[in-house]
Image (cartoon, grey):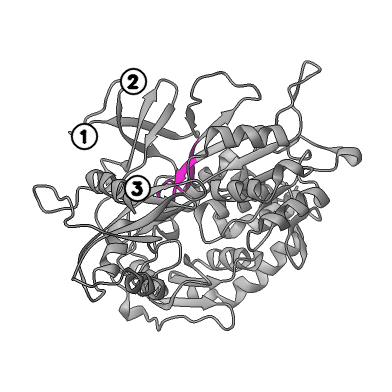
Amino acid sequence: MEGPRLRRRLKLWTGRLDLGALPAALADRYGTRVAVEADHRTWTYRELAAEVDRAARSYEALSGQTVLLRWSNTPELLVQWFALSRAGAVVAPVKARALDDEVQAIATATGATAGVAEPGLWLPELSRASAENGPVGAAAGTAVLLCTSGTSGTPKAAALSHGGLQAGFLPLLPLPLGWRRGPRGGRDAVLAALPLCHVMGLAVAVGALMAGVPWIHRSRFDAEAVLQLIERRRPNAFVGVPTMYADLETAGAAHRDLSSIQLWVSSADAMPTERARRFQAMGAAVTVAGRSLGRAVFVDTYGMVELSGPGGVRVLPPVSVGLPVPYRTRPGLAVRAVGPDGRPLRFGAEGELQFRGTGVMSGYRGREGGLRDGWLCTGDHGRVFPGGLFLLSGRSRDRLKVGGFSVFPAEVEAVLDACPGVRDVAVVGLPDARLGERPVALVVADEGFDPDVLLAWAEARLAGYRGPHAVLRVDALPRGPHGKIDRDRATRLGRAAASRA
């Protein structure tokens, strides 16, 4: 094997390869094997690497800059991402369907000095002089600045490294690999319809590519279309978020032939165990010692942007053990629970979960917070056990999970507070069978205030999943001694008001 190819191969499997060099290394490894099957075309590994190479040559002038990347949710977005990284740029992705205010907010948060957009998509004016703290404003080795939110408030841009992102992909590599080989069973294939601007969508795409497993990508999720594709294409792995699984059930998944699926994966939010069990029964049977147990494997991941993707996984066994299944941290990542005073707790005691190690962000660009002595403060609560095992007991009230996406109540409140007639507002998450939780606005308003006015105000200024699904009038909002909203009490107030509505 030639020297450059061998060095690329070694760096690939040790996680020391920049993302921009991945396509060439994977082309060396997998050649003409199918890499991507998309809505409109198929790429081999060599074709993917060639497209990245062509695009990278046109981006050489962007070396050292932070580049806002706005592209539709297609594999071409990944091509542009790899090409910018290969040219030496730090990528700041933004959704194609984001509102103009959201795009501007992300440009400001990341300090983007240049932009690349699909034809027809708007970008704000950007200049090197407008960037605060330099063009990157993050630690050396930063590969991407991913925003934890994109409202017109103040999103936070997490600085993630090349090595950290590859560590985030690691939990996905061995799962489907080698389960199904040969002409009779076909080859492994991973089906997903996740947004590539989100860390989990990126992790699934790159994880599948690194494993040499065809990645079947759909630019948008449609439950009926996905069920038809599983029956026709017969992939053996599917990755989605809990909302997608709920929609698949509503579309009649129980009555379709999903027997090719050996592996179900859920990401972005906690998956209800009973729903996971139902999908296990719909998939391929797992055989142990010649005996069929009749259930596929289900993997539920715990993660967030600041962890470069999955921070832990829990594998539901083919048979129920009658006890909660804990998450296991990925290699190179440590977890602990701390009390209100910030001190580590003994094993089994409930506290805030904190993580440290490979993949943890270096910080938020131009902002304080998030890290304490190298530990990522998640705000989520759980119990930690020996061996890197942990149980999740509750999400932070400062971060809602709506259909797998993070929503920060304080930022939504800043938008709603500017609506005429609103005197005080708090956004809380209420349980939702499909979305996990839905944002609801608790409002103290002027006499005669019409809640529909606030809903219309939010619709014009916030992405759909971030806006309130309902407006509930209250006499006053619960606040702590320092005037901050008491989010636990506000959530209880919201549930009580919703039950009366």
| Residue 309: in magenta span | yes
Q: Furthest-top residue in view? A: 289
Judged left or right of residue 465, residue 32 is right
Residue of label 1: 342
Residue of label 3: 499
Q: In the drawing, what numbered circle is on residue 347?
A: 2
Measured Cα–Cα span from mark 3 to mark 1: 36 Å
Is residue 480 visible in the rendered image? The answer is: yes
Secondary structure under badge 2? loop
Residue drawn at (57%, 43%), measured in percent from left and top? 266
**Amino acid type shown at disc 2:** Phe
Query: Magenta span: helix, strand or loop, mainly?
Result: strand
Which segment is the magenta one? 302-312
**Amino acid type shown at disc 1:** Gly
In the depicted structure, whether residue 60 falls above or below residue 477: below
Q: Are marks 2 and 3 in contact (CB under 8 Å)?
A: no
Judged left or right of residue 110, residue 170 is right
Of residues 186 and 433, which is closer to you in this image? 433
Of residues 125 and 56, which is closer to you in this image? 125
Secondary structure under badge 1? loop
Q: Quadrant of residue 169?
A: top right
Q: Quadrant of residue 133?
A: bottom left
Residue drawn at (56%, 72%), measured in percent from left and top? 71
In the depicted structure, whether residue 276 falls above or below residue 49: above
- Classify 10 Å Cα crowding around label 3: few (below 14), some (14-19), many (20 and above): few
Q: Are marks 3 and 1 in contact (CB under 8 Å)?
A: no
